[in-house]
Image: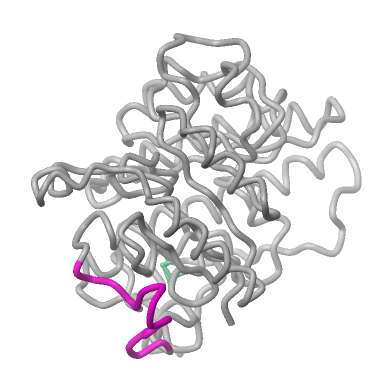
Amino acid sequence: MWLYLVILLDDASTSYCHYRPHPQSLSQSGGRKSLMPIDTLKNGIRFGMKENLMIQFVYPERPLPEEYNEVVESIDHSKIKLVNATTPNPSFPKEGSKDADVLVVNEWDTLPQKAEVPIVIRTSKDDFFARYKEIFTLLANAPRVNISFTDVEAFTEADFETYKNVLAEIGKEVERLFVKGKTPQLNLLTDRMMLTQMNNCGAGDTTITLAPNGKFYVCPAFYYEDEKDCIGDLEHGLDVKNKQLYKLEYAPICRHCDAYQCHRCIWLNRKLTLEVNTPSREQCVIAHLERNASRELLANIRKHGTFMPDTEIKEIDYLDPFDKREEW
Ligand code: SF4
């Protein structure tokens, strides 16, 4: 069942996930680096209203013409915007980002120290390993912090070990904040503690994306990778081939998994295994290191008193569910 419609207002809309925004292929394919035509935007909103979808607008860094703002405000929505990159180390996001519902950080030097809305930090693994302590202040001063790796496929066995240690260090800070009475939210560590079932991305299952060309895509990454890879358009409606493949029940590995916080990124799956419903080892090991670090964090917080007494994250002896396939 469709629940969300992501509308890319511009070919240069920010990425808020693993994929790279507006790569060269777009600007090379006929100079399409452009704003969504206003009639396409209006028709997209009409489609979302008819289907009763929650709309998420993804903004480019440059400001929109005023007439676009009026159309955007004509419907309930949320806004995803980039933290303004021209202000290094802002204590608060700049004016243009102020009405965002989610703010994206693409460069560590633009990381705010506090925010009133969730912050998504897109980072390479190496930058994260080098600078993860910079999120500590934000953890205490933002409603939520999400980390999204831009190079999942580049994780090596040595990186997995480093990631495990980094998660343990961040866990100590999260524990300290909980003990002080704060409730930090960090997707890598606190989501799994709160979840009792899979809570994945939903691209192609509950969420679709409308691109500036008036066509629908599984998610923005599919558009930026190959604009011919569409699943319908505003004129003819949706046409999703093998829709069941995007569902958890048809994901042969994921449906046996309890790393409930995992993105289960359909785009990464296809990129790395050529199947939308089969994850790569990197995605699974990363998610299991987070799962196990969440388990550790839960135990450590409980040393200070009762905390989520009904929650249990079992001890497991694997990092990739694929290794356990003979037991399913
Ligand atoms: S950890 Fe692997 S198996 Fe589990 S949900 Fe994520 S991608 Fe699927």
Position above or below: 49 against 163: below
Q: Is residue 215 part of the magenta span, yes or no?
A: no
Residue visible at 31% across and 45% down in the picture: 11
Rendering coords of residue 84 (x, y %): 47, 21
**Would you say 167 lies left or right of 324 here?**
right
Question: Is 69 positioned to the left or the right of 25 in the image?
Answer: right
State whether the magenta stretch is mostly helix, strand or loop: loop
Which color mode does the image show? one colour
Q: Number of labelled discs?
A: 0
Horizontal and vertical percent position of residue 273: 21, 71
**237 inside magenta stretch:** yes
Q: Relative to the observer, which residue lies in front, 113 or 168? A: 113
Q: Is residue 245 above or below residue 172?
A: below
Question: Which residue reaches farthest right?
Answer: 306
Left or right, residue 122 beside residue 156: right
The image quarter in which residue 54 lies: bottom right
Which of the four quarters of the rendered structure image does ligand 1 lie in? bottom left
User: 162 or 278: which is nearer to us?
Assistant: 278
Q: Position of residue 147 (x, y in %)?
A: 49, 40
Position of the N terminus, as image quadrant, is bottom right
Q: Which residues are magenta?
A: 228-243
Q: Residue at x 40, y 27 (%)?
A: 62
Instruction: Name the residue located 19 percent from the left edge and 62 percent from the top edge.
Output: 226
| In the image, residue 177 above or below residue 319 | above
- Residue 52 on image: x %, y %: 66, 73
Query: Who's the residue at 58% across and 34% down the image?
Result: 119
Q: Nearer the viewer, residue 262 or 296?
A: 262
Quarter of the C terminus within the rendering: bottom left
